[in-house]
Amino acid sequence: MSQVRVRFAPSPTGFLHIGGVRTALFNWLFARQQNGVFVLRIEDTDQSRSTDESIQAILEGLKWVGLDWDEGPFRQTERMDLYRGHAMQLLERGQAYWCVCKAEELEARRKEAEVKGLSPKYDGRCRDRGHTNQAGDAALRFKALQEGETVVDDLIKGKIVFDNNGQDDLIILRSNGYPTYNFSVVVDDALMNITHVVRGDDHLTNTPRQVPIFQALGFPVPQFGHLPMILGADKARLSKRHGATSIMAYKEMGYLPDAMVNYLVRLGWSHRDQEIFTRQELIEKFSWKNVQTSAAVFNPEKLLWVNAEHIKISPPAQIAQALVPLLEAAGLTDEVQTVSASWLAQLVVLVKERAKTLVEMVSWVRPYFGQAVTFDDEAAKTCLTPAIAPILGKLLTRFEALPAFSKQQWEEAFKQLVEEEGVKMGQLAQPVRVALTGRTASPGLFDLMEVLGRDRTLFRLRQGIERASQA
RNA sequence: GGUCCCAUCGUCUAGCCUGGCCUAGGACGGAGCCCUCUCAAGGCUUAAACACGGGUUCAAAUCCCGUUGGGACCA
């Protein structure tokens, strides 16, 4: 068995979108599982639409989701000679011919055929005329097979039979000397020794056009696999209209690469009832057999849930690391520098059950930086009342009497006071929570005291008492 | 128009190949309850689907044919 070689071949005509990432992902998973090679090829022959910024965006996106490639990126515009050379080979062997039909003529004949109820394909007028390209404005057409069948045994869809009779004599070199999509793809896939061509469903009908070209060129035909499309909530193909479709937009929104990968693979692939997978698990468990044949609707809510699950299972230190740039962007640059990595990881543990994204996590984590607390006015108003100030004072005294912070001891002291005062737990807990975090919602009181440390806990308690007395 | 693909809860899906274990399972989201110092998380319960019609068979979500509906490509 020869080594598996797969590729991802995007056109650089915009950012890297969700659908592209998923196509890349299936290829990458298969390559990693089979110890194969993942090739990145940029299909930039359409120069009017291709941009360097797009190429950068694609590379950036792939890097962010962690889909590393082994070869490339190759650019088709740097391989023009190869396409032309192979086109000439076909011409020499009589498997291609120059066509001098003009665009307007073709259009007219196509319309005529349509009116007569015939198929609008090229009528083969130049097929056996032996034209040359003297004027330099002829297009080169491939002599398509006219009888028999082209059978594609798709990795995902199974056996598909196409009647060669319906195939057109495709242009492989335009009159401007540029190769067409179907031709450059074949030459590249062949020359790069791609063993498995896995791409979107939209290329399924390109396959019977490409297979005869492989054969005419004398190359082995690779295996094909066609992935179902991703649709928006309206069941239309995913596009800009559906909001965030650039993969980098998800980075901005605080999604984890592992969560994106998990969600995107599960959208069209399954392993019984399992929902959450680590990257390594996906590599091990992936198989074409379990890839879905029908299109799937992209569901942001489930993605959010998957992200939350990954925040829970990822190593806290790793989350902390990913969080740092976001904290800096939120204006906490100085504060972040003064804390240790292990404290940051401890902080992540404190809030990771609550944050579904890193962006949410930033807001959860904010109150734990700095000495003083910033009160939410509404929270302070309802919880830090003059009536509670004396009890908070007693609590402060008892805490101060304890030399070092100990979760059990402080909790004991707290509960004892609650009992003595004859109040409910919540009646004291909420004011303390607001004093310590400035908000009414937070992790467990004693857990957050631990992260805050003795000094800051006492400091903020005093601050809270002050605020309560003034109210 | 031609060719091809697809069809299970609102959504992602299991089951389909190798018919019976399916009074169709799981997950997201929804509803309700529990837990609880708040918010989450978690636990439990619940509503919700085999597109339709024919066949084959003792038996069909599962096999076959057709219909309908979606989609892709070609232009």
Image: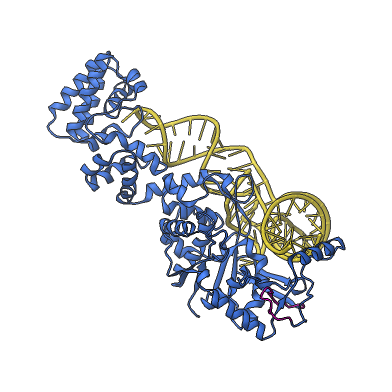
Chain colours: A blue, B yellow
Q: Is A75 left, or right, of A468 in this rendering?
A: right
- Asked whether, in this view, residue A426 is left or right of residue A66, the answer is left
Task: Please state, as top left, top right, bottom left or bottom right, where the C terminus of chain A lies in the image.
Answer: top left
Number of numbered callouts drawn: 0
Q: Is residue A440 magenta?
A: no
Identify the residue at image location x=49%, y=57%: A54
- Residue at the outermost front position: A135
Front one among A172 and B1: A172
Residue A385, quarter of picture: top left
- Residue lying farthest to the bottom in this orientation: A93
Type of secondary structure dominating the magenta stretch:
loop
From the viewer's perspective, tell me whether residue A18 is left or right of residue A357: right
Q: Nearer the viewer, residue A8 or A401?
A: A8
Lateral position of residue A161 relative to residue A317, left or right = right
Q: Is residue A137 in the magenta section?
A: yes
Residue A26 drawn at (x, y percent) = 51, 63
Residue A413 is situated, as x and y percent measured from the top left of the image, at 20, 27
Between A91 and B74, the one nearer to me in the picture: A91
**Residue A159 in sight:** yes
Choose top left, top right, bottom left or bottom right for residue A344.
Answer: top left
The single residue placed furthest to the right in the displayed view is A116
Compared with residue A385, is residue A372 higher up or lower down, i.e. above or below? below
* Residue range highlighted in magenta: A131-147
**Residue for point 28% across, 31% down:** A445
**What x and y, as percent, mark residue A164?**
74, 74
Q: Is residue A273 visible?
A: no
Q: Position of residue A435 (x, y in %)?
A: 27, 25
Q: Is residue B20 above or below residue A177?
A: above
